[in-house]
Image (tube, rainbow, N blue to C red):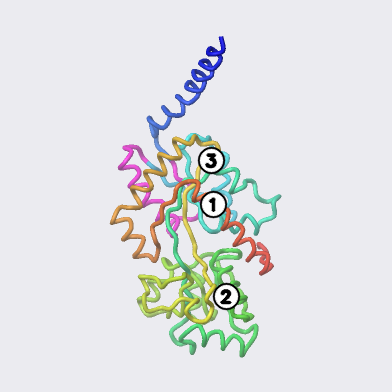
Amino acid sequence: MSIKPFALTLVVAAACAAPLSHAADVYPSKPVRIVVPYAPGGPNDIVARLLAQKLGEMEKQPFIVENKAGGGSNIGADIVARSPADGYTLLIVATSHAINMTLFPKEQLKYDLLTDLTPVSMIMTGPLVLVTRPGYPANNLKELVAAAKAKPGELSFASSGNGSSTHLGGEMLNTAAGIKTIHVPYKGSGPGLTDVIGGQTTYMLDTMISATPFITSGRLKALAVTSKARSPVLPDVPTVAEQGYPNFEAVAFIGMMAPAATPRPIVDKINANLQTVLAMPDIKERLASQGFTAEWMKPAEFGSYLQKEVLNWGAIVKRSNVKID
């Protein structure tokens, strides 16, 4: 008599597990959309389209990139958080989402990054690079800091938007170096870099993918990168840490998430596919040429990384007293 309830429990457990296992076996059986919460043409969009092509080839199903820009990247994230948790709607998530958890008041955020979405994998990481116009007198970080200290509040730095990683990177440098400079936000990296070239702003900490073409063409000069180690793309450019600030590091990331209740077998299958794609030589080389490092993580590992990023960037937002427009 005592065996029957136990046997029944096993049968029920097996029956519950079977649909999940089957779902992963047949996934994907229709097109999958990858939501990019930014405008076309930026690094997040470029990466999403690279992945979509490879994943589509692997699974024999279309992976379609949809750009849902707006709200400081929150609109696209909210769309995914509210989508069916079946693996057919995925999100490209980036540093801005970790920042937004503190930057935006809770009543303005319609989703929670850490509870309404589930981590799938890291995709890549990359440093910022500090650039100024070729004719500017400072040729290294020490000289730039000296110029800022000589004229407090007169030097200005551009960013790709208020509260962006490029903005907070500049605020981090101000704190680390003990300088006061003026933040000038732009609607994207392009306009900001253009004004640095033209001398309307003094410098900018921008992503490698945006700034490197201007550096290699000689229209901008690089003074420092914000990673712990030098970038293979700009091996002659020293890090901020090398130039007197050993604890300084500001690294942007791009990853993938899905709605919170997405079945674990489906999340694991997408994660395994991403591991394969990110190990492909052509993908690694393409990302490396843009200053990024392909970096796969297991879902739980990426989840822990996101929690730390929310805390780290949140502390910078609070310390800098950054407010959204």
- Residue 173: assigned label: 2
Q: CA distance from mark 2 to mark 3?
A: 35 Å
Q: Position of residue 78 (x, y in %)?
A: 58, 45
Give the quarter of the figure containing the N terminus: top right
Q: Quadrant of residue 238?
A: bottom left
Q: CA distance from mark 3 to mark 1?
A: 17 Å
Where is mark 1, residue-wise? 304
Q: Are marks 3 and 1 in contact (CB under 8 Å)?
A: no
Report the residue that reaches farthest toward the left: 281
Q: Nearer the viewer, residue 268 or 324?
A: 268
Q: Which mark is first along the chain, 3 or 2?
A: 2
Where is mark 3, residue-wise? 259
Determine the residue positioned at 63% across, 54% down: 101
Determine the residue positioned at 65% across, 83% down: 153
Q: Is residue 217 left or right of residue 239?
A: left
Q: Are marks 2 and 3 in contact (CB under 8 Å)?
A: no
Q: Which residues are magenta?
A: 33-62
Note whether 238 is above or below 186 in the view shown.
below
Q: Which mark is first along the chain, 1 or 3?
A: 3
Q: Is residue 51 left or right of residue 79?
A: left
Q: Position of residue 165 (x, y in %)?
A: 55, 65
* Mark 2 neighbour class, 10 Å CA radius: few under 14, some 14 to 19, many 20 or more: many
Please tell me whether mark 2 or mark 1 is closer to you in this view. 1
Q: Position of residue 251 (x, y in %)?
A: 49, 65
Determine the residue positioned at 35% across, 63% down: 288
